[in-house]
Image: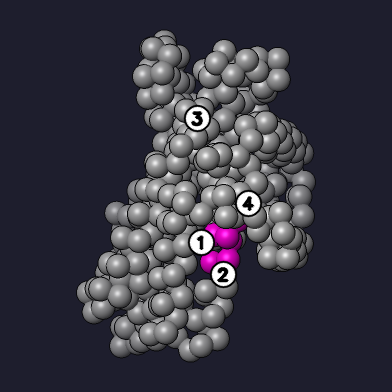
Amino acid sequence: MTNVLEITLFGLCVFNHELRRRFTEIKKQPLLIGVGAFILILIIGCFYSVADYQDTLRSLWGWRKILLLPIALSLFADHVWKDRFIKVSVGFIFLCSLLSITSFIWQFEVYRFTPGIVIRNPATQGMVFAVAIFSIVMGFIYQKRFKVQHEWPHIFYMIPLLIAIIFMTSGRSGYLALIILSIYFCYRAITYKKNYWVALFVCLLIPSLFLNSSIVKDRINLGINEISNVSAAYEKETSMGSRIIAWKNAIELVKERPLLGVGTGGYEPAFVDHVKDQKGQENFLHHDPHNQFLKILAELGMVGLVIFLSFLGAALLQRTTPFYFDLSLGVLLAWCGTSLFSSHFSTFTEGRFIYLWLGVLLAYKK
């Protein structure tokens, strides 16, 4: 359904005169230029990819989610619609947290997920729950300026979100996102509102909750143990151990073609060819090294990585208001952090989420 709606949206943007006109109004915005440059290098990468043409085009097509960003830039310049987007998003995620808690307590499955998981997987759920918490507390410190005390979700709405992410969700990406967003919130609470007590409270609250959560401690200890015993991953694949092995092989791939990489969609065939004589390594995350930046470096080289980082950096040049800028920058930093261990700018759910989030919140009028 997501794919059908997405293609329909793309079609509307092509054939609707008003939507095409809106694109001409944002053609000089830094973020749009950054998106265009990255799409261009992806297309160029198709011409020298080591993958066959079907896998190359499939990989290029998989990046179509990035088009949601310029579409959102063209549609959400009005702050009224930005606020509605935030409220609807946070409200929906809040309801998901209630369902998550209910599912966990009563041990029933939603769709085919494990009890307590209602959004895609533990990592995705943890990340979007963290974003909802961040949005609520940022709305709290900005509320006087925006005069929305009676409309914004009350600060206590984040309690079920915190309970769900810390005590019922096992995704380490969610924990990392929450930590990064908490640090950014403390920074803005101090620099914008001079509210040292709020920052101190958050600095004490989040670590205390983590330390009192058995699921968090178990997942972190497991990750540390897997990192400490990478050699064991050769016999039995482990989450962190396999990542380290995949990173090592990906770095070796980069050394072979550092400037332009192996081309769009070329990582998997290049990886398989690279480890063909290394018994037992052919199945270690051969399709993705679980590091977004390393994968782009391997496929598009240093040129592609610089363009991708420039595209993300263009977000800093968007002339939106401080509130929306903080919401977008905090979440962008969280995605950059988690993408050191996954590819959250290109995965199905996380990728679409971040591009919509940035496009909506960083849109502005001339």
Which comes before the other along the chain, label 4 or label 1? 4
Mark 4 packing: few (<14 Cα in 10 Å), some, or many (20+)? some
* Mark linked to residue 70: none
Circle 3 SS class: loop
Q: What amino acid does circle 2 point to?
A: Gly
Distance from disc 2 to disc 3, alpha carbons, whole Å, reads: 32 Å
Q: Main secondary structure of the magenta part?
A: helix
Kind of residue indicated by mark 3: Thr
Q: Nearer the viewer, residue 264 or 44?
A: 44
- Residue with the mark numbered 1: 346
**Which residue is under mark 2?**
62
Q: Tag 4: residue type?
A: Arg
> In this orientation, does residue 227 appear?
yes
Q: Which residues are magenta?
A: 63-68
Q: What residue sits right under mark 4 in the picture?
A: 22
Q: Secondary structure at mark 4?
A: helix
